[in-house]
């Protein structure tokens, strides 16, 4: 009897103790989730030992050596992960959302993903401030991603909260739900042998803040990697399938598409009912976005093709704000239905296709748009001028051809010209009747057969006469030049009366035929241009996103040779005092003199011939073509690529 009473009392004490502990821990967990920062580690899962500090969350290695973490409660819970795991972390929480706090966590998957989230409830990754964390699969991964999930995934953290994800087999993050990035500093790196996308979400991708850097380097034929793809799935009441970017800093280099809302009715529908179809739109409302694609387009069949577009939506691309930079080997922006620009800043250059391509309509209602296309393609392509509407904002399009805004509802005014060929470094101005600059453009790259250029500006007035001229701006930056800039005219190209919303001279459409070569695209050590957008100075892990975008342009000829040629060409010219050449050929004054002479008195063909020489001895601020190194707009220091467990 005494033994029974003793056991009973002990059991009551233990039960009371566990009940009290559960109250304290659940209350703590709810508080930590709602707080802006985590001040306590709460329940700790030691990845190395496979243990949990609370009975609320069970942790144990299974027979395969993978760590299973299970929570059966109904209230939100948070768990801190720390230590090293060579295997898979399997998390189950069927009845409640949960937060995984990564605090010096290193997880290296072997034959399975590094992390498997086997619940449809929302999983939040909160990266601990000041911590570095690594998640990686291996080339032997038999599943679909380095991180796989049955539900939505959310990322939180500060710019000092670092997470590296290495992808060796297929996708980086693969979820049946959606992905939301609210914060943290995340780098996802795909190996050249990876046959998937760095983020593959069925429902949606939303970015509200933080820093996300993606290197989608997988180049296996017909399975080349994309940066972010939202697949879209049919669902009762309508599916999702969209991309939405509201803030943060997004940098993507990819062999395939950089961003795509990829659900296509003709290919992906499984039911006849269209009410359950997803809407594959891309919405950009803010943030700083840079996308670069590197693959060479090809198409042998539906299953064997590559279209390395920058931002693609099978339905609509809608841009309301933000700063967008795209350097692509296929279309920079491509939409199945419409591209609508209401605000923001868009700078796009396509080396092997159209800059902005819509299979339906293009609308520019606000913002600033600079788009260029080489390889005999178009800056604006919507198949017919009647599909292009312009009501506000400022834009310029330069390429082998252009659609012009002649759609019903067009209220803005545009001027287009297509009777000559422009070259890298050409400084083009549209002047009003008083000779004042309304809008200008400095061609930043060598664009193959640049024969068509179109300008749109709210400063244009119907009934006035405008002149397109070549010359030099006193203060020049590559790309778009604002109204009121000081300009020295060298050659008048054409004058046009603005008698309608859109006027043009020459052939503005696409010129087909002739040499399809790339000309001097200049993919070597040359500068990238573009008008300076608002300052962007976030701190990427290991580097800086584009700052002031001013560019550090590199010449390809000895500066003294160039100056001598310039002086010889302008020997009979009386130079203004502000451009007098000094004895120091490396001085700022000499550089400005060279720019002045180039813009006003020097035959461009002669200069271009000289320009093909060595770059070993010269360095100067000079408008030129092609990206510096591997596309380095604004002299960017790209995010440093961390080393993965199996190499990069």
Image (cartoon, grey):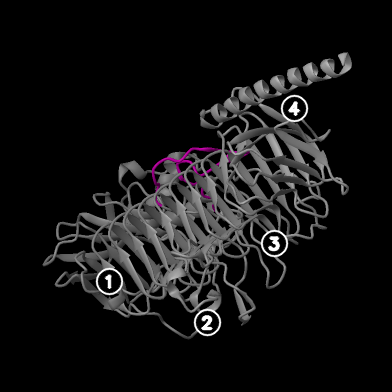
Give whichever of discs 3 and 2 has the lower sequence position: 3
Which residue has dot 2 on it?
Answer: 515
Cβ atoms under marks 1 and 2 closer than 8 Å: no
- Relative horizontal placement of residue 632, taking residue 411 as reference (left or right): right
Residue at position x 61%, y 65% in the image: 256
Q: Is residue 537 magenta?
A: yes
Q: CA distance from mark 2 to mark 4?
A: 70 Å
Residue 548 sits above or below residue 298 on the image? above
Residue 630 point in image, percent of width and height: 61, 55
* Residue 518, picture quadrant: bottom right
- Relative horizontal placement of residue 73, taking residue 104 as reference (left or right): left
Residue 463 sits above or below residue 574 on the image? below
- Give the residues drawn in magenta, as a range: 531-555
Which residue has dot 4 on it?
Answer: 53
Marking on residue 218:
3
* Residue 592, picture quadrant: top left
Q: CA distance from mark 3 to mark 2?
A: 32 Å
Which residue has dot 1 on it?
Answer: 405
Of badges 2 and 4, the one in the foreground is: 4
Give the crowd class for mark 3: few <14, some 14-19, many >=20 residues within 10 Å: many
Give whichever of discs 3 and 1 has the lower sequence position: 3
Secondary structure category for the residue under label 2:
loop
- Magenta span dominant secondary structure: loop
Give whichever of discs 4 and 3 has the lower sequence position: 4
Cβ atoms under marks 3 and 2 closer than 8 Å: no
Residue 462 point in image, percent of width and height: 13, 66
């Amino acid at each position: 009897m005494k033994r029974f009473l003793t056991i009973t009392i002990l059991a009551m004490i233990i039960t009371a103790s566990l009940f009290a502990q559960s109250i304290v821990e659940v209350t703590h967990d709810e508080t930590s989730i709602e707080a802006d920062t985590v001040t306590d580690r709460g329940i700790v899962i030691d990845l190395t030992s496979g243990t949990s500090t609370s009975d609320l969350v069970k942790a144990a290695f299974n027979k395969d050596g993978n760590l299973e973490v299970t929570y059966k409660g109904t209230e939100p819970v948070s768990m801190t992960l720390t230590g090293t795991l060579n295997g898979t972390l399997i998390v189950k929480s069927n009845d409640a959302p949960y937060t995984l706090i990564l605090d010096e966590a290193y997880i290296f998957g072997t034959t399975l993903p590094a992390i498997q989230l086997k619940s449809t409830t929302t999983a939040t990754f909160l990266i601990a401030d000041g911590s570095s964390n690594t998640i990686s699969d291996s080339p032997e991964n038999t599943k679909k991603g380095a991180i796989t999930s049955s539900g939505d995934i959310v990322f939180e953290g500060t710019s000092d909260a670092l997470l590296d994800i290495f992808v060796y087999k297929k996708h980086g993050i693969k979820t049946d739900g959606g992905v939301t990035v609210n914060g943290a500093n995340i780098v996802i790196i795909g190996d050249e042998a990876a046959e998937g996308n760095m983020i593959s979400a069925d429902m949606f991708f939303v970015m509200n803040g933080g820093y996300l850097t993606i290197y989608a380097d997988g180049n296996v034929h017909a399975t080349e990697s994309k940066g972010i793809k939202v697949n879209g799935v049919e669902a009762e009441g309508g599916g999702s399938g969209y991309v939405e970017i509201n803030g943060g800093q997004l940098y993507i280099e990819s062999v395939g598409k950089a961003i795509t809302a990829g659900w296509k009715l003709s290919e992906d529908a499984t039911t006849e009912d269209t009410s359950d179809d997803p809407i594959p739109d891309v919405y950009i409302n803010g943030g700083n976005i840079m996308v670069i694609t590197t693959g060479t387009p090809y198409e042998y069949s539906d299953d064997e093709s590559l279209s390395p577009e920058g931002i693609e939506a099978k339905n609509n691309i809608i841009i309301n704000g933000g700063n967008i930079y795209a350097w692509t080997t296929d279309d920079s922006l491509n939409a199945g239905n419409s591209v609508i620009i209401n605000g923001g800043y868009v700078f796009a250059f396509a080396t092997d296709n159209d800059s902005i391509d819509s299979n339906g309509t293009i609308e520019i209602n606000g913002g600033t748009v600079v788009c260029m296309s080489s390889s005999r393609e178009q800056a604006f392509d919507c198949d017919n001028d009647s599909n292009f509407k312009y009501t506000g904002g400022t834009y310029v399009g330069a390429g082998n051809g252009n659609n012009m805004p002649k759609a019903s509802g067009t209220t803005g005014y545009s001027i287009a010209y297509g009777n000559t060929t422009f070259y890298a470094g050409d400084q083009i101005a549209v002047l009003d009747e008083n000779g004042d600059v309304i809008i200008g453009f400095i061609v930043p790259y060598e664009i193959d057969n640049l024969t068509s250029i179109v300008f749109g500006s709210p400063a244009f007035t119907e009934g006035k006469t405008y002149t397109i001229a070549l010359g030099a701006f006193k203060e020049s930056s590559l790309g778009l030049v604002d109204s009121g800039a000081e300009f020295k005219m060298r050659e008048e190209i054409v004058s046009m009366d603005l008698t309608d919303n859109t006027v043009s001279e020459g052939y503005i459409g696409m010129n087909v035929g002739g040499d399809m070569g790339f000309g001097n695209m200049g993919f070597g050590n040359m500068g990238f241009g573009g008008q300076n957008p608002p300052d962007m100075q976030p701190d990427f892990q290991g580097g800086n996103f584009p700052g002031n975008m001013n560019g550090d342009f590199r010449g390809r000829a000895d500066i003294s040779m160039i100056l001598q040629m310039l002086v010889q060409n302008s020997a009979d010219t009386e130079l203004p005092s502000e451009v007098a050449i000094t004895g120091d050929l490396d001085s700022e004054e000499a550089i400005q003199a060279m720019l002045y002479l180039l813009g006003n008195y020097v035959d461009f063909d002669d200069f271009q011939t000289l320009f093909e020489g060595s770059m070993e001895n010269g360095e100067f601020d000079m408008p030129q073509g092609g990206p510096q190194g591997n596309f380095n707009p604004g002299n960017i220091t790209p995010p440093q690529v961390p080393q993965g467990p199996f190499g990069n």
